[in-house]
Amino acid sequence: MSSSAQVIVLNGGSSSGKSGIARCLQAVLPEAWLAIGVDTLIDVMPARLRLGSEGIGFTGDGEVSVGAEFRVLEDAWMAGVASMARSGARVIVDDVFLGGVESRRRWEKALDGLDVVWVGVRCDAAVAAGRELARGDRIAGMAEAQAELVHRGMRYDVEVDSAKSEAVECAKLIAATVGNA
C-alpha cells in the first residue's frame, strides 16, 4: 500500500490515544513516518513559557490558555513540520485543536500544497479522564474538558474512537484511508 499522503494530522483531546495511534501507524504503514506531537513542542519551550501568560498555562480545572509568545513559536513549529514534509519526510502530527476550526485553519495554512489526511481521534470523556488519571502527568480535568471541544465544527477524512477500538485497529482504519489518498 503506497500513498501520496505526506502528512497525517491526528486531532483529539488530551489522553484520547493519539500518541499510541501514531506509534501504531508507524508500525502498520509501509513507508517510514515521523511522529511529532504538540507535547514535544511544549517540552522544548523555555520553562518560563510553560508558566506565564505569554506561553501556555494550565488551570486547576484542566483549562488551557495560550499566549502570544507561544503562538509565535507554534507557528514556527508548524512551518518546520511542513518543511520536513515538503523535503520528503512523511509526518504524523499529534495535536489538540483547542481553538477548534481556527486551529485547523492554522495547520491548513502551514501545510498548503501538501497531501494531508485529517483524522479525528474521539474518546469518551470518562474513558479519557480515566487514562489521564492513570498517566499521572496531566492536570486533572483536561481530558474531560477537551474530549468534545476539539472536535466542534470539524470535518475529517476519517474518524476513529479509541474508547471502542484498540490503537492498532484505529491505525489500520487510518492506514486504509491513507492508502486511498
Image: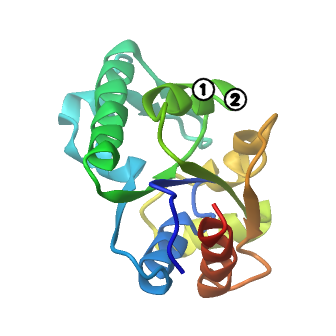
Q: Quadrant of the N terminus?
A: bottom right
Q: Which residue is mark 2?
A: 101
Where residue 97 sits, quadrant-wise, is: top right
| For residue 120, above or below residue 19 | above
- Kindly tell me whether residue 42 is visible in this rendering: no
Please state which of the two labelled residues, at mark 2 or mark 1, is closer to the viewer.
Answer: 1
Q: Nearer the viewer, residue 53 or 98?
A: 98
- At label 2, counting other C-alpha atoms closer than 10 Å, the crowd grade (few under 14, some 14-19, many 20 or more) is some
Q: Tell me whether the residue at label 2 lies in contact with that at label 1, contact meaning CB atoms closer than 8 angstroms.
A: yes
User: In the rendered view, would you say 82 is above or below 109?
Assistant: below
For the point 76% across and 70% down, the residue is: 161
Name the quadrant of the C terminus: bottom right
Which amino acid, mark 2? Answer: Val
Tell me how many marks there are. 2
Residue 57 position within the rendered picture, expressed as x and y whole percent measured from the top left:
43, 31
Question: CA separation, marks 2 and 1?
Answer: 6 Å
In the displayed structure image, the side of residue 73 where residue 110 appears, left or right:
right
Q: Is residue 176 left or right of residue 35?
A: right
**Residue 82: x and y, percent?**
36, 39
Position of residue 25 measured from the top left corner of the image (x, y, whole percent): 50, 76
Q: Residue at x 61, y 49 (%)?
A: 142
Q: Nearer the viewer, residue 171 or 134?
A: 171
| Location of mark 1 (residue) | 105
Q: Is residue 92 visible?
A: yes
Amino acid type of the residue tagged 1 in the rendering? Arg
